[in-house]
């Protein structure tokens, strides 16, 4: 049986870094070397401020041990030299290392597979013995890349399906959460991955569905390609629909209006923004001239700016990010003087905010757009504070409040009609 003694991983990004930390932790007898051409990233991995945030990596310092070495090769060719010294090579970078694939007897594991493997390892971090992990690694090598892509496409399709139902619920007055609960009770369907949202993000779903589309087109299966393309189209539609709802509610214009956008990561407990719906919601609002004040507990300011300045997002006007976007250090600052508060990531902390003080400081009528249904249990309290609530997949009944003018309106006496103007 092939025994792994040393692993060289190419790429210290979202996949390589965490995967190898877990492998080094679980299998101390394996020497793990991670190489990356990005000097700043390598430096960050070797410091106390890690370049990425993943919830389990909180304990990174205890995970990393002497068997893990993250370094930067002097030249790209050196990567190959390092790689051939090891007996197991993992490519965790988007740039191809196809030469490696041809080199026997090295075991080459492509990045997508290791991402799945990382998740298996991550899940089993506390439960599995290192022996079991090694068995899992070997099995993972045998798993077909195609199976992983199809699995992700099925999961993405489930989210697009429930998001399509959310549009129907908003139009008819039903509640998508109730629908999801009911259909999830059917064991053939199951209850997981039925959460309606502002759309799925992350590095895998879109990429894997588009891979399928590409494959189907290449194999002359246009109907199948269109079927999968629709999963992506529905996701884009959900994002656009949410942004349009914000604009509609804010009296058909957001130009020069301050909007607080809470959450920029593609899901909670990560600082990862790849394909995050927040990027697209921001784009649609920026296209309409909104002033965005963005807060996320884990995404660095530079990352948000970089995502929004991307040519696909800010096209020929990257300067608009400087003019219209402010990144704030706390959510209250973002909401101060805002017309609307928009939740795009389901961070738990957003349920615990002091909404009374937020409401006091917002412009009225103060709107909340909950793109993740995190405030479901708080609707009544929030309405009593005076918020107008809009949420995915449900129409929240509006409470009517007596009109309280902010300044005194002059009183007219019905007894004294205004004096008639003399006829000329
Ligand atoms: C995914 C797959 O789950 C994993 O198996 C694969 O190896 C990599 O891709 P990941 O991208 O980390 O994992 O996150 P996941 O938890 O699957 O969520 C993906 C996106 O879908 C997120 O934006 C999430 O918020 C969204 N989502 C998920 C929903 O909108 N509704 C749901 O019910 C579940």
Image (cartoon, rainbow, N blue to C red):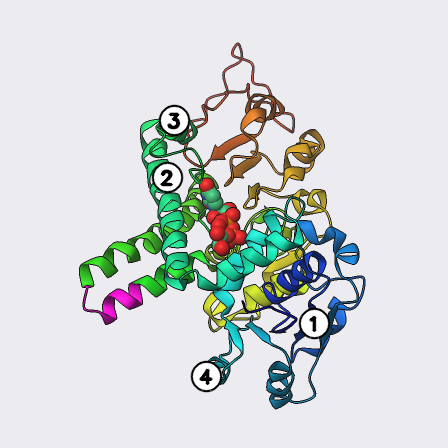
Residue at mark 3: 185
Give the x, y percent position of residue 154.
Answer: 36, 49
Q: Which mark is residue 221?
A: none
Which of the two discs, 2 and 3, labels the residue nearer the N terminus?
A: 2
Task: Using the rendered image of the protein, determine whether residue 201 is visible from the camera's viewpoint.
Answer: no
**Viewer-nearest residue: 252 or 196:** 196
Q: Secondary structure at mark 4?
A: helix
Distance between the Cα atoms at labels 2 and 4?
A: 43 Å
Residue 181 among magenta residues: no
Above or below, 357 against 400 in this view is below
Distance between the Cα atoms at labels 2 and 3?
A: 15 Å
Instruction: Residue lying at the far front in this picture: please name it.
Output: 1
Q: Secondary structure at mark 1?
A: helix
Distance between the Cα atoms at labels 4 and 3?
A: 48 Å
On the rendered image, what quadrant is the C terminus found in?
A: top left
**Viewer-nearest residue: 335 or 351:** 351
- Label 2 near ligand 1 (CB < 8 Å): yes
Give the x, y percent position of residue 109.
Answer: 51, 70
Label 2 vs label 3, nearer the camera = 3
Which of the two discs, 2 and 1, labels the residue nearer the N terminus?
A: 1
Residue at mark 2: 162
Q: Which mark is residue 41?
A: 1
Q: Which residues are magenta?
A: 213-221
> Quadrant location of residue 188?
top left
Which of the two discs, 4 and 3, labels the residue nearer the N terminus?
A: 4
Q: Which mark is residue 102?
A: 4
Residue 219 among magenta residues: yes
């Amino acid at each position: 049986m092939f025994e792994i003694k040393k692993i060289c991983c190419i790429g210290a990004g979202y996949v390589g870094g965490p995967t190898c930390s877990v492998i080094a932790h679980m299998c101390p007898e394996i020497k793990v070397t991670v190489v990356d051409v990005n000097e700043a990233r390598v430096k960050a991995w070797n410091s106390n401020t890690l370049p990425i945030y993943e919830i389990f990596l909180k304990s990174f310092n205890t995970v990393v041990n002497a068997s893990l070495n993250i370094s930067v090769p002097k030249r790209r060719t050196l990567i190959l030299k390092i790689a051939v010294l090891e007996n197991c090579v993992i490519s965790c970078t988007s740039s191809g290392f196809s030469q490696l694939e041809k080199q026997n007897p090295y075991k080459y594991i492509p990045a997508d597979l290791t991402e799945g493997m990382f998740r298996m390892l991550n899940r089993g971090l506390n439960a599995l013995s290192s022996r079991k992990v090694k068995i899992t690694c070997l099995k993972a090598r045998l798993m077909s890349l195609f199976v992983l892509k199809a699995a992700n496409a099925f999961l993405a399709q489930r989210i697009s399906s429930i998001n399509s139902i959310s549009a129907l619920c908003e139009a008819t007055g039903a509640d998508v959460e109730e629908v999801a609960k009911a259909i999830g009770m059917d064991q053939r369907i199951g209850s997981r991955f039925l959460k309606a949202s502002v759309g799925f993000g992350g590095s895998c779903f879109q990429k894997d569905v588009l891979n399928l589309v590409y494959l189907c087109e290449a194999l002359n299966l246009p109907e199948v390609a269109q079927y999968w393309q629709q999963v992506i189209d529905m996701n884009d539609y959900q994002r656009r629909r949410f942004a349009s709802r914000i604009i509609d509610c804010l009296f058909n214009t957001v130009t020069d209006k301050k909007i607080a956008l809470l959450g920029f990561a593609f899901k909670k407990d990560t600082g990862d923004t790849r394909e995050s719906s927040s990027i697209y919601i921001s784009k649609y609002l920026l296209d309409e001239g909104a002033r965005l004040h963005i807060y996320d507990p884990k995404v660095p300011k530079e990352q948000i700016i970089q995502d929004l300045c991307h040519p696909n997002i800010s096209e020929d006007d990257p300067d608009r990010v400087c003019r219209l976007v402010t990144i704030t250090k706390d959510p209250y600052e973002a909401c101060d003087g805002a017309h609307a508060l928009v939740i795009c990531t389901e961070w738990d902390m957003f349920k615990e905010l002091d909404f009374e003080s937020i409401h006091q400081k917002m412009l009225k009528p103060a709107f909340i757009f909950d793109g993740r249904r995190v405030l479901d249990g708080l609707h009544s309290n929030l309405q009593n504070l005076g918020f107008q609530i809009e949420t995915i997949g449900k129409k929240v009944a509006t409470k009517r409040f007596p009109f309280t003018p902010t300044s005194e309106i002059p009183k007219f006496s019905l007894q004294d009609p205004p004096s008639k103007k003399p006829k000329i």
